[in-house]
Amino acid sequence: MTNSTSSPQSPNDSSLDESAYSRIESILGPVDAALSRDFPGDRVGGQPIHTVYVAASDASVDVPQRWGSVALSLLDSNPGVVESLDTAGVLPRVRRILATRPIQDLRIDFEDGYGWRPDSSEDAHAREAGKTLSALAADPDGPRWLGIRAKGLAPHERRRGIRTLELVLDAAGGVPDGFVFTVPKLRAVAQVDAVVALCEELERAHGLADRSLRFELQIESPQAIVGRDGTATLARALGRADGRCTSLHYGTYDYSAACGITSAQQSLAHPVADHAKNVMLAAAAQTGVWVCDGSTQVVPVGTTIEIDTAIRRHFGLVTRSLERGFYQGWDMHPGHLVTRWAATLSFFGSAMPTAAARVAAYLDSTAGGIMDEPATAQALSGVLIRGLDAGAFDEHDLGAVSSSITKDILLGLLNRTVGGPTA
């Protein structure tokens, strides 16, 4: 028995010889490599707060301006209800954003929001969509992210979807900056293999740069969450995406209907939605893949009471999603921009003073009663980076809390290149 008063062994004191360490390393070395490859870390910074879906028949370069104008009109027509929700004083910022850059991510839709039309019509709309996306990508005030949702991978529609994607890319003159295409109704892991193969074949056939095509997976089926073999289909699918999958999008109504939920109960807040989205969040964690919440079909139109109810409902749903770690969602109507921006700026604006103070205390090694771990400092930095990206506050506002906090410092904490207190 070791004497309890003896000094502890140093790291170099061991009864194990080098062959023992080599044996352990031979097991863990491949594990280290696989974990580093598959879980490089969360991609914080740059994620849009929403994706706006517009039917291809209605898409044009003035969509952002048109949507922003309608949103401002709704705000001006219903000041009381919106002001009652604005406990953080963000409406001036919301107005500026709606007047200048209301849409962060635009998806031109050739699937459910477009329907089936003669091939000649869809061909024409695909060519127009390509020109529109190219023009928007070149506009410094246009959406930073943009793309299309083509028809899915089912036998009756996949050739049509591929043709549309080709026509869009040809008309755009290649892959526009920020371009991504959405793959709807994922149901099987092997479908992702096919999407990767499609990207490779399109790049080869159209002379596009290698790995220039990226895609999103839309989760609208229970089979995408739990496969017949009991495994999480989605987690396995991400491992087969060849690093091309940028995000996962939840499809509220298709998923709910597939689970047998009646239309009156289908919602972002239904338990089946929470389960699916939590699996999405866990599958994407530390992979660099973003997760996007779904949409609501309740839009702010109709009577004063109906508009008031819809505004409050959407504001509440966006806030609920943010509280649960879903920092992006679908917007299907211009009126949703008001509550999307108001709820998002309020969420991050309200979080900023406490988060910034705790980051400053972490950096100064004086936690004021809260001893934060490095992982917590990372999470707090992520909140502040997202708030900066959304425009909820700026670096001057952070400096008013602590002069030690800058965006570069926050990014350093996220990337573990800035240290905190040491023992």
Image: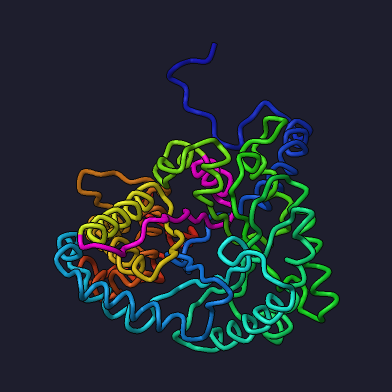
- The reply to whether the magenta stretch includes residue 34 is no
**Foreground of the two, 263 or 147:** 263
Residue 68 placement, left or right of 263? left
- The reply to whether the magenta stretch includes residue 301 is yes
The quadrant of the rendering that contains the N terminus is: top right
Can you name the residue that lies furthest to the top here?
1
**Foreground of the two, 14 or 127:** 127
Question: With respect to residue 2, does 338 lie above or below?
Answer: below
Question: With respect to residue 189, does 357 lie above or below?
Answer: below
The quadrant of the rendering that contains the C terminus is: top left
Residue at 43 percent of width and 60 percent of height:
413
Residue 151 placement, left or right of 73? right
Residue at 35 percent of width and 84 percent of height:
100
Please identify the quarter of the rendering in which residue 27 is found.
top right
Please identify the quarter of the rendering in which residue 357 is found.
bottom left
Give the colour scheme shown.
Answer: rainbow
Question: x and y percent of residue 411 in the render?
Answer: 44, 66
Question: With respect to residue 104, does 151 lie above or below?
Answer: above
Residue at 71 percent of width and 72 percent of height:
118
Residue at 64 percent of width and 38 percent of height:
232
Q: In this view of the protein, can residue 388 be seen by the observer?
A: no
Q: Which residues are magenta?
A: 276-304
Question: x and y percent of residue 24 in the render?
Answer: 73, 34
Q: In this view of the protein, can residue 85 be seen by the observer?
A: yes
Question: With respect to residue 266, does 287 lie above or below?
Answer: below
Question: x and y percent of residue 386 in the render?
Answer: 39, 64
Q: Count all numbered tags in the image, as a single digit.
A: 0
